[in-house]
Amino acid sequence: MITRLYSFFTCVFLFSVISNTSFAQISFCEANGTSSEDCINVVSTAVPLLRATSEARSGAMGDVGIAISPDANSLYWNSGKLAFAENPVGVSVSFSPWLRQLGINDIYLSNLSAYVKPDDVQAIGGSLRYFSFGSIQFTDINGMDLQQYRPNEFYLDFGYSRKLSNSVGLGLVLKYIHSDLAQGQNVNGSQIKVGQAVAADVGFYYTNDIALGSSDAILNLGMNISNIGNKISYTDDNTVRDFIPTNLGVGTALDLLFDDYNKLTIAVDVNKLLVPTPVADDLDGNGQPDHRDFNAIPGIFGSFSDAPGGGAEELREFMYSAGLEYWYNDLFALRMGYFHEHATKGNRKYFTMGMGVKYNVFGLNVSYLAPTTGNQHPLARTLRFSLLFDFDNVNAAN
């Protein structure tokens, strides 16, 4: 068995790692005699940290990012906008310590992203995200120490973005997912292995200058379908395979250009996991909920109409983000935002705030997260830090 698993399972709970989803008609709530309106029925996946915000700009704006102006982190949010980046070369390094509220000091999320624009109509980017779950002590059934282990995950992305016109961009991202949680351990006769998957993102971006009264403005629209890929398994017999967090996100951002010195961005994102909703049925009698028998693509299409509670429950599966960003003279930024998830679908609700400074090619962003569910929430006081470097030409980066 494992000691210190509280750290790991807290992460699992926060981002819904435990995978139970289905297309059948009876929910776990109904099976337990609880009304669907009150029952917690979280849509959950493996490798949920694929959906975790690692960088501080969006982290300060309530986790919006699909349609805000592009930067070196665009590959994660919406690759379609990367070709619209102002600078030919950009690099971002981000770091976020996790679960400090619980007194844990060795869990963190880090990210390295970069892009280059060979010309004005296209961009190539890549990123590496790494999550450390800290150090865990494995023990036998008698509580005797076996070995120390450091579970971790990393995701490697490579993307291409191209302008189709002066206003429209499309992007494609290919990614490799590596999840090492307990390699080599034996559970119920099955050997635990590294979970691996490949996936793709498809992003769309639209931007156009508009006039609002006497002020100039820029309207941005975006859509991103992320993590379209195979199911993942952690056992050597591959009998249990879990969905990865395929997600549909749509967003809009309005940049209000008051004058040469003052700019305000108002942004809203809406997200929905394209993963089946948990149900209790086992119609084929194979000992597991029927959703586990579906492949990834049927799961994506069925996720819009499979909730046992009908349309009302489907609507509860949407997540909402809203954020503000104010820039003074492109040198100093203030940000704030809010993220909302329904109480029966994960109950993540929090305000965010942060600031940014930019000088020459260098930028620094910091964000702070404050849950509305109380200061004892594991995510309370989460900090994110990002360094950005924007270069005017490729040679300046060398």
Image (tube, rainbow, N blue to C red):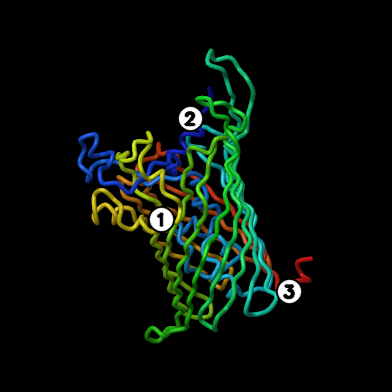
The answer to whether 149 appears left or right of 100 in the picture is right
In this rendering, would 350 be left or right of 162?
left
The image's mark for residue 298 is: 1
Q: Earlier in the sequence, mark 1 or mark 3?
A: 1
Whether residue 93 appears in this view of the structure is no
Quarter of the picture containing the C terminus is bottom right
Report the disc number at residue 6: 2
What's the CA distance linking mark 1 and mark 3? 45 Å
- x, y (%) of residue 373? 34, 43
Q: Amino acid at mark 3?
A: Asn
Identify the residue shown where x is 40% and y is 39%: 377
The residue depicted at 52 percent of the width and 54 percent of the height is: 229
- Could you say whether the residue bearing mark 2 is in a helix, strand or loop? helix
Q: Is 358 positioned to the left or the right of 239 in the image?
A: right
> Who is closer to the viewer here, 298 or 101?
298
Q: Position of residue 244 (x, y in %)?
A: 48, 49
The amino acid on which the numbered mark 1 sits, given as a three-letter code, is: Pro
The answer to whether mark 1 and mark 3 are in CB contact below 8 A is no
Which residue position is annotated with label 3?
A: 393
Alpha carbons under labels 2 and 3: distance apart: 47 Å
